[in-house]
Image: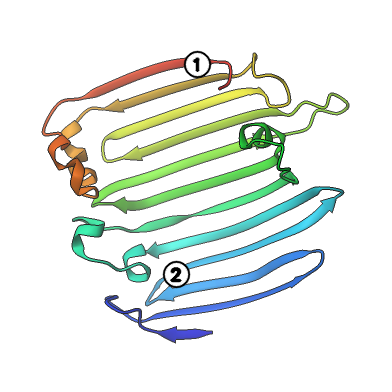
Amino acid sequence: ALEGRIPSAPQDVRLSFNGSADRAGVRLQSLLASSGSANARLSAEIKRSGPQRWQITSEGELKTFDPRVWFPGPDATWGPGQYLFNGRWALDIHAPGLQTTTSLAQWLPLLLGRADVKLLESRVAGLPMQADLELRQDLLAGAGAAPSRAKADIRLGSAQLQISGAGDAGEAGFNDRTQVKLNVPALGEMAPLFKLWPDAGAWTPRRGDVQLQADLTGRW
């Protein structure tokens, strides 16, 4: 375990971890980063699951986690407002080895497994935030294709972004369908986000709204 203070951080931090590695893979049995009552906990493992295949698993939880304690910087770096994250994640992915002749776009559809991320009662630049992300890609018995499903529901302040998609990852993408819905009823509410990028100051919205709905077919 390590204890101490990160330069310019507002409070003391504690980091403890337990891991191991061998020819079969790398394991992080536990990692706990805490500061006061706030903490982040995770475990992860990367191991061989067959010839030229790897399994990646991880799960973790955030409780009143403030990233500014661990990654401090000038006020201009983070901008105004509170940053706070509560949530959890879990993933179990089986991946083929990435060959030098395989592009990332070709490799990603070959992934199998699941990933779930949930954020509740969180804040970004002072805006309340919650998110629910779900990814599934399962192997069809004897078919060799991986039916994929993706769902995302992200709320920031009064804004909401919803994305849903489905398709056959093992095919050329002709059956892929993606639907996107974006609703920002008070665009000026998003102004604190623009302060994260000083060069975007001239584009900071003051008023207005945005509504977007799109249906996409195929794959890039």
In the image, which is nearer the foreground, mark 1 or mark 2?
1
Looking at the picture, how far across and down is residue 147, in whole percent? Answer: 70, 26
For the residues labelled 1 and 2, the Cα–Cα distance comes to 39 Å
> Badge 2, how many Cα within 10 Å: few under 14, some, many 20+?
many
Residue 66: tell me if it is visible: no
Residue drawn at x 44%, y 49% as measured from the top left: 119
Quadrant where the C terminus sits is top right
Residue type beneath disc 1: Leu
23 vs 12: above or below: above
Q: Residue at x 41, y 50 (%)?
A: 120
Crowding at dot 1, Cα within 10 Å, few <14 / some 14-19 / many 20+, comes out as few
Horizontal arrangement in the rendering, residue 4 relative to residue 177 (left or right): left
Query: What residue did someone put label 2 on?
Result: 39
Q: Give the image location of residue 190, x and y in percent.
A: 21, 39
Sequence order check, earlier mark of 1 and 2: 2
The residue that disc 1 covers is 216
Q: Looking at this view, is 35 or 107 the one in front?
A: 107
